[in-house]
Image: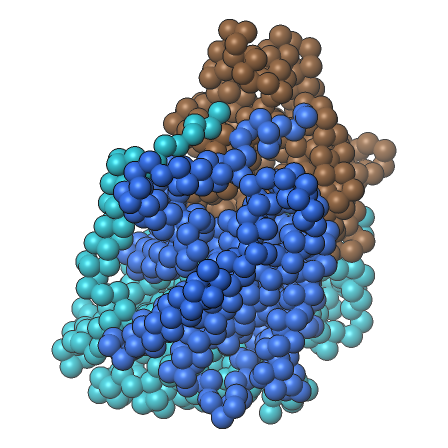
Amino acid sequence: MGTTTFRRDLVIAVIALVVLLGIPLVFPSAALRDFIIYVVAYGLLAISLNLLTGYTGLVSFGHALYFAAGAYAFGLLMQSGKVSTLSAFALSILFSAFLALVVGAICVRLKEIYFAFLTLAFQMLFYSVILTWVSLTGGDQGLMGGIPRPPLFGIDLGDPHVFYVFSCVLFVVCVFLLRQITESPFGYTLRMIRDNQERAVFLGVNVFRAKLLAFVLAGSIASVGGIVLALFASGAYPGYAFWTTSGEAIFMIMLGGSQVFIGPIVGAVLLQLLNHIVTIYTEHNGLFLGIIILVAVLGLRRGIADFIYEAWAGRRAARAPAVTAKAQGTEAAAGNKEAAYDPLS
Amino acid sequence: MTQVSSGLLMGMLLFLVASGLSLIFGVLGIVNFAHGSFYMLGAYFAYAGYMATESFLVALAAGTLGMALFGAVFERLFISRIYGRDVLMQLLLCYAFVLILDDIVKIVWGANYLLMRIPPAFALPPLFVGGGAIPVYYAFLIGVSAAVGLLLWFAITKTRFGKTVRAAAINPQMVSALGVNTKLLYTSVFAIGSLLAGAAGALAAPVRSLTPGMGLSILIESFIVTVIGGMGSIVGALVASILIGLTRAFGSIGFPLFVDGLMFTIMALVLILKPSGLFGRQV
Amino acid sequence: MSKPKTGVRRRDVLKSASAVAGVAAASAVTGFPFVAKGQGKVIRVGMPTILSGRVAILGESSRAAAQLAVQEFNAAGGINGRKMELIARDSKGSPNEAARVTRDLINSDGCEIIIDAEASSGSFAVQEVIRSLPVLCIHTCSETSALSADPAIRVPTAFRSARQGIHDAVGGGRFAAELVKKRNLKRWMTCSPDYAYGRDNTAEFMEYLKIFEPSVEVVDQAWPKLFEPDYTAFVTRILQVKPQAMYSALWGGDLVSFIEQANLYGMFAGDLAFFSGGLADPPVLKAIRQLPDGLNSVYRYDPQYPAHKGNADFYDNYRKIHPDPTNWSWQNYTAFTFVTKALKATNGNTDGKALADVIRGMEIDSPFSPTGKITMRAEDQTIIGYPVAWGKTVSKSKGMTDWVAVDWGEIQEHEKEWKRRKGYV
C-alpha cells in the first residue's frame, strides 16, 4: 500500500512538474510566469498551514510568521554577502523551524480559539519587532536595495526563466514532501488527534510531540514560500508578517478546500486569480472580494476542491458510509458551539 | 495625573468597543471580526447625522441607535446563518464585511479626512483636576462611557433580561426549551454589542479624524482587551481596557517604540498563564 | 446545533459549479488575463498607487491629476497620432502588491511608462521592478531622499518628480532659524509618526535647524505610531514639557486628529511656535474644524502660490474632476509634463532608455515653481526648482499666507555637503 501510493505520488509529481515547466513554452507570457510564481509562494504558505488546520485540527492564526521569517532571514543573509545562496537557504529554513519550535512548544498545549489567539499574538509580536528593529530590518520600508542573486551551482537565478524553473521545482518538491508526511503513519496520527484527541492519548500517542512536530514542519515549508517571494520581489516587507497574510492563507484553504490534499493550492490559484482580476476591473477591491468571500461562506459552505471531490465520491458510492463519516468527522473537528466556545464552562 | 486621564480616555473608548465584542462572543459564540468596522460606521453615521442637523444629540443618536439597528439587521441576515459553524467560517464572514464596509464608506463619504465639530457646549477651557488638565469634552466622554458600562453591568447581572442572557450563554437549548425566544434574544444581544461599538465611534467622531479603514487599529486593541480580560467578561473588558489605555499613555512616554509589542506580550502571557483571561468566568 | 450531512446535495454542486463558471467567465472577458497586449496605437501609462484604506486620498488625488494631464495630452492631439491611456491600479498600500501590480502593468497590460504614485515603502518595491523591467518610471509621491540620492538604489530609467526630504530639511532649518533668532525660541520638541519617513524627516529638520542656529536645544521627542487615532497622551506630554517651539512630521488624517485634540487642551492658544511638515495640503486645512492662526507649514500645495495663472487654471480644471488637489496632485501633473516633453523629443519613441536619456537634465516650464522652471537634475534624476517655501495658516479662509521661499542655491550647497557625508558621492 505504502509503496504504491509513493510511486503514484511520484508519478503525479513528475507530471505536475512537466506541466508547470511546459506552460511558458505554450504561453510565453512574462505575466503568466509571474502569476505562477506568486501561486507557488502563497500556495506553499496555504498548503503547509493546512497540515495544521485540515489534518491536525489546529487553527493557527499566525502562520505568516514563518513565511516572513524565511523571507527576512534569507534576504538579510544574502545582503550580508557572507554566505552562499545554498547555505542562506538552509539557514533560513532552520531559523524558521527554530522559531516554530519555540512558538509551537508554547502554543500547541492550548485549545481551539486560545491556540488561534496565541499564535496570532506571537505573529504580531514578530511584526512589531520587524517594525521596531529598523537598523536590521529597515522597519516599515522593508529590506531595501534588492536581494543579490549570485549563481547557484552555475545557474543564474537573476534570469526570469531560470528563476521560474527553480521556483517550480522547489514547489513540487515541497508539496511532494508534504504529501508523504500526510500519508505516513504520522499523518494518520495527526488525523486521529484532530478527530478524537482522547482516543489518541488512550492509544499511547504523545499528542504534544506530534502536534509540535506538525507545527515545526508546517512552519519550515511556509518559510520556503517566503524565500521564493523574497527572491522574486527582491525584498522583504513587514506586511508578510501581518495578520492579513495569515488571513489570506486561511481564506485560500477555505476557498480551495481543506479535506482534499491539493485544496489549498486550488485556493491559492483562485485567490490570486481573483485578486488579479478584481484589481484590474475595479478599485473597489474590498467590496468585490468581500462579496465573493460572502458567497463562498454562505453559499458553498466549503472549499471548491472539497466540493468537487465530495460530489465525485458521492456519485461513485451514493451512500458510502465512509464519505459521510468523513464529513461528520470534519464537523466534529470544527466543533459545535456549546463544546468549543462556551466561555463560561 | 494628565497621563492617567488620557489613559482613562483611551481606555474607556476601547472599553465600549471591547465590551460589545466580548458580549457577542460570550453569548453568541461569534468572534465578530467586523466589530472595528462597526466602530467606524458609528462614527460616520454620527458625522452624517451632525451634517444633516448640526445637533450633537442627533449625531449621537444616529451613531448609537443607527448601529443598533444595523447590528440587528446584520445578525438576522448573515450572522444567524453561521451559528455553530466552523470558527474559520465565522471569521471569514466577518472579514468579508470588514472589506465591504470599508469600501462602502469610501464610496459614500469619500477618502478625504472628515471630522465632526466638537459640540459648542463643550468649547470650554479644560478642567483642572489634581494638577492635570482634562478637556471638558473628554470628561464628558469618560463619564458617558463609564455610565454605559455601569448600565450594561447592571442590565446583565441584575435584570431578568440579563439573567436570560447569561443562561443562554451557558445552555441555549435549555433556555429555548423554557419558552424563551432565543432568536430574538440573540438578535438583541448582537444589536446591543453593535450599539456599544457605534457609541464609541460617535463619541470619538468630533476628535478623531474619520477615514475608511479607521476600525482596524481599534479592532486589534479590542481583541487584545477581550483576550486579556477574558472572552465574554464585561468586568474583564473594563479592567483590561483601562490597563491597555494606561499602558499606551505611559508607554508613549517611557518606551514609545515597543508599545504595540508590549501589548502583544501581555496578551501572550495571559494566554499562556490563564488562557481564559483574567476574568474568564463571568459575564 | 450542527446538522449532520448526508452526502452532497445537488443544489450545492450547482452553486459551486456556477461560482467556478463565474471566475472562468471573468477571465474569458479579458481574453486571457496574462497575455500582454503589446505595443498598440495607444500609449499605455501604468500607475500603481493606493486607492483603498487610510491613505486612499493619496491615490485618488494622484490619479485625478494624471487623468487631467492625460486629457490635455490627448486634446492636444497626442504624439504622432498616438493617444495616451492611463491605467491606475490599487496596491492597497502594500509594497508587495505594489511590486506585483507594477509587473502586471508592464508585462500584461503592455504599459510603456510607469508613473509610480506609491508611498515611500511601495516606491522602493517599484524601483526593484523597474531595475529588472527597465521602462521609464517616474516616482511621484515618495519624498525619501535615499530613493534618488543613494547610488546603490538608483536605476537608470527611474526618476522622481516629488519634493525631497533633504530639500525640505534644509529649507525648514533655514526658515525656522530666522524665527528662532527673532523670537528667541531655544527649547524645541518634536512629535512625529513613528515610521521611516517620520523619523528621517524629523531628524533631518532638527539637524539643519542646529546647523543654522546651534543654540537650539531639543528637550524632548514624542513618537506616536502611524495612524494613531488618539494623540491625547502626546498632547499632555507636550503641555508638561512646555517647549517654546515644536516640529511635527505628522500628515493627513493623523495631523487633523492631532491638531483638533491639541485644541481641546488649548495647546495653540499660548505662544508655542508650531512647525509642520504636512499642514499646507488643502484637504487637511479644510478638514480641521478649528484651524489655529499662524501655524507654520512647509509648502505642500496652494492654488494661490506660486501666483501663476497656470497654477490657478490647474486648480480650476482639477476641481472639475475631483475635490481639492494635494501635494501629490501637482507632483503627478508635473511628471506628465516631463513625459509629454520627452515624447516630443524622442518623436514618440517610448523605449525606456530613450525617454530616460532626454528626461535626464530636462528643464520644463511649470506653473508650480516660483521661478517658472522645474529641472530634472541629471546627476541623481530628481527634480529641483519646485517651491521649498514656508507659510502661515489663516484660520478664517482655511488657507495659507506669507510664503517665504528658500533659495535653491543654498539648498543645493547644503545638499552636496550632505551627500558627501552620507557617502553618496
Q: In this view, does A228 lie to the left or right of C266?
A: left
The foreground one among A251 and A79 is: A251
Residue at 63 percent of width and 82 percent of height: A87
Q: Can residue C56 be seen in this view?
A: no
Q: Which quadrant, please, contains the C terminus of chain A?
A: top right
Residue at 62 percent of width and 28 percent of height: A342
Residue at 60 percent of width and 92 percent of height: C425
Chain ID for brown: B
Q: Quadrant of residue B143?
A: top right
Residue at 65 percent of width and 9 percent of height: B159
Q: Can residue B145 be seen in this view?
A: yes
Q: Quadrant of residue C11?
A: top left
Percent coordinates x, y for residue C166 in the rendering: 59, 76
The colour chain A appears in is blue
Percent coordinates x, y for residue B45 in the rendering: 46, 31
Percent coordinates x, y for residue A179 in the rendering: 48, 62
The colour chain C appears in is cyan
Percent coordinates x, y for residue C197 in the rendering: 60, 66
The foreground one among B214 and A249 is: A249
